[in-house]
Image (cartoon, helix red, strand yellow):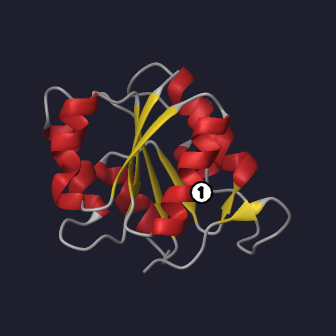
């Protein structure tokens, strides 16, 4: 059972992510205020961090950078999740230190697969052995069967 910290300000997305992770045997812990995320990460000592990018107070990008600079947390895999994606966003998210990037609405199957890959991968390595651009954010961009998530608040 992996401990997974979720940093998300949307209650419906928190419920979705927590339910999915718990159903796959993980122990999810959610933080709604990004200002408390680093303290919660120190307390939880997570095996994975899943963070929204569009957060009030401390952005997901800034949070990723803070985790990467923290000696205790620097090697923890990070999955970034966002409903707003523009050209260059994935590159900025990966440059900040996230190993995976998933756009909303999420594919439930792909979300679970990416979590499993991140948890199984050696620290600081792409879990699939593929280039960054070819994993975690696959799909045609539109919702379909098995896809969930949505607009951020």
Classify residue 21 as left or right of residue 110. left
Residue at screen point 28% across, 60% down = 61
* Direction right: furthest residue: 145
Which is more toward the observer, 42 or 63? Answer: 42
Closer to the camera in the image, 129 or 107: 107
Q: Is residue 80 visible?
A: yes
Residue 106 position (above or below residue 22): below
Residue sitting nearer the eye, 140 or 6? 6
- What is the x, y in percent for residue 68? 22, 39
Quadrant in which the C terminus appears? bottom left
Compared with 143, 95 (above or below) is: above
Instruction: Give the residue number, with chain letter if any, for mark 1.
Output: 16
- The picture quadrant where one finds residue 56 is bottom left
Left or right: 152, with 135 as reference point: left
Residue at 66% of width from left, 41% of height from top?
A: 112
- Dot 1 surroundings within 10 Å: few (below 14), some, or many (20 or more)? some
**Image location of residue 91, percent across then percent down:** 42, 60
Image spot of residue 71 (x, y percent): 13, 27
| The quadrant where residue 21 appears | top right
Q: Is residue 135 visible?
A: no
Total label count?
Answer: 1
Q: Residue 43 in the image: state x and y as whole percent.
A: 20, 32
At horizontal 32% and vertical 61% (from top left) the residue drawn is: 32
What kind of element bears circle 1? helix
């Amino acid at each position: 059972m992996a401990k997974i910290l979720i940093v998300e300000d949307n209650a419906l997305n928190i419920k979705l992510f927590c339910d999915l992770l718990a159903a796959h045997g993980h122990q999810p812990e959610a933080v709604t205020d990004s200002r408390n995320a680093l303290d919660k990460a120190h307390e939880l000592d997570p095996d994975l961090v899943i963070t929204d990018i569009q957060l009030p107070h401390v952005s997901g990008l800034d949070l990723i950078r803070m985790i990467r600079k923290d000696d205790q947390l620097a090697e923890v895999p990070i999955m970034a999740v966002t409903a707003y994606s523009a050209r260059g966003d994935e590159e900025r998210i990966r440059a900040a230190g996230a190993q995976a990037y998933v756009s909303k609405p999420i594919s439930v199957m792909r979300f679970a697969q990416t979590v499993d890959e991140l948890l199984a991968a050696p620290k600081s390595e792409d879990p699939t052995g593929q280039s960054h651009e070819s994993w975690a954010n696959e799909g045609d961009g539109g919702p379909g069967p098995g896809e969930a998530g949505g607009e951020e608040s």
